[in-house]
Image (tube, rainbow, N blue to C red):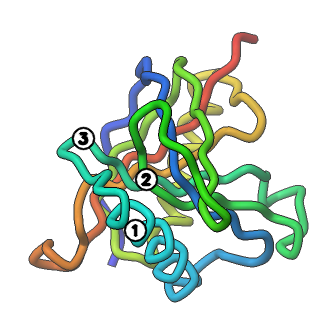
Amino acid sequence: MPFDPSPVIETRHLPRRHVAFVRHVGPYMGDQALFGRLFGEASAFMQARNLWGPSTESLSIYHDDPETVPPAEQRISVGYTVPEGTEGDDAIQIMELPAGEYLVGSFELDPQQYGEAWGVLMQSLAQRGLMSAAGLCYESGKNDPEQHPQGKHIVDLCVALTKA
């Protein structure tokens, strides 16, 4: 079943954020079990340090272009936003997502529709004559799909923009 063919896509200024994350190198597309495991590891870190808050975001950060980097070498970072100054440990690292202009597409998806949604966002990027900043694309989860009546993922897909 296709998702809404006319999602809200707009340019937004997004704030700087700090992320507690687990990194994975290798194939990931469509691997729900992998994402579940990675989010589980990051969630345990958050729980152990009582870092959950009303503004906590779940993030999947894609560091490599899947069109040019072989699946075995693709890097993703999966985790949650944390307060500035949070320290990682042996399993969880901390990174900063820079503030800046992003093209943001807001979608309501089934788990298997992420690729199609990214295609819509990238097509919009090209149609608008915008250029992406290399290596900074991510998904920001807005709900717990297990709490959604149809199990949908409400998510913002974000692409950092660079000046032409």
Horizontal relation, residue 110 to residue 121: left or right: left
| Residue 149 figure quarter | bottom left
Q: Residue at x 43, y 18 (%)?
A: 13
Residue 132, placed above or below residue 21: above
Can you identify the residue that label 1 sits on? 43
Viewer-side label of 1, 3: 1
User: Please, what is the three-letter code of the amino acid marked with disc 1?
Assistant: Ser
Q: Give the image location of residue 159, x and y in percent.
A: 58, 36
Indicate the secondary structure of the residue bearing disc 1.
Answer: helix
| Residue 92 figure quarter | bottom right
Q: CA distance from mark 3 to mark 2?
A: 10 Å
For marks 2 and 1 on the same chain, the one whose residue lies earlier in the sequence: 1
For marks 1 and 3 on the same chain, the one whose residue lies earlier in the sequence: 1
Indicate the secondary structure of the residue bearing disc 2.
Answer: strand
Q: Give the image location of residue 124, x and y in percent.
A: 54, 36
**Residue 88 in sight in this render:** yes
Disc 3: CA contacts within 10 A as few (<14), some (14-19) or many (>=20): few
Which of these two is toward me, 112 or 47? 47
Residue 130, placed above or below residue 8: above
Q: Residue at x 43, y 53 (%)?
A: 80
Indicate the secondary structure of the residue bearing disc 3.
Answer: loop
Can you identify the residue that label 2 sits on? 80
Can you identify the residue that label 3 sits on? 55
Q: Give the image location of residue 112, x and y in percent.
A: 46, 78
Q: CA distance from mark 2 to mark 1?
A: 8 Å
User: Please, what is the three-letter code of the amino acid marked with disc 2?
Assistant: Tyr
Which of these two is toward me, 97 or 4? 97
Q: Give the image location of residue 75, x and y in percent.
A: 76, 61
**Residue 5 in sight in this render:** no
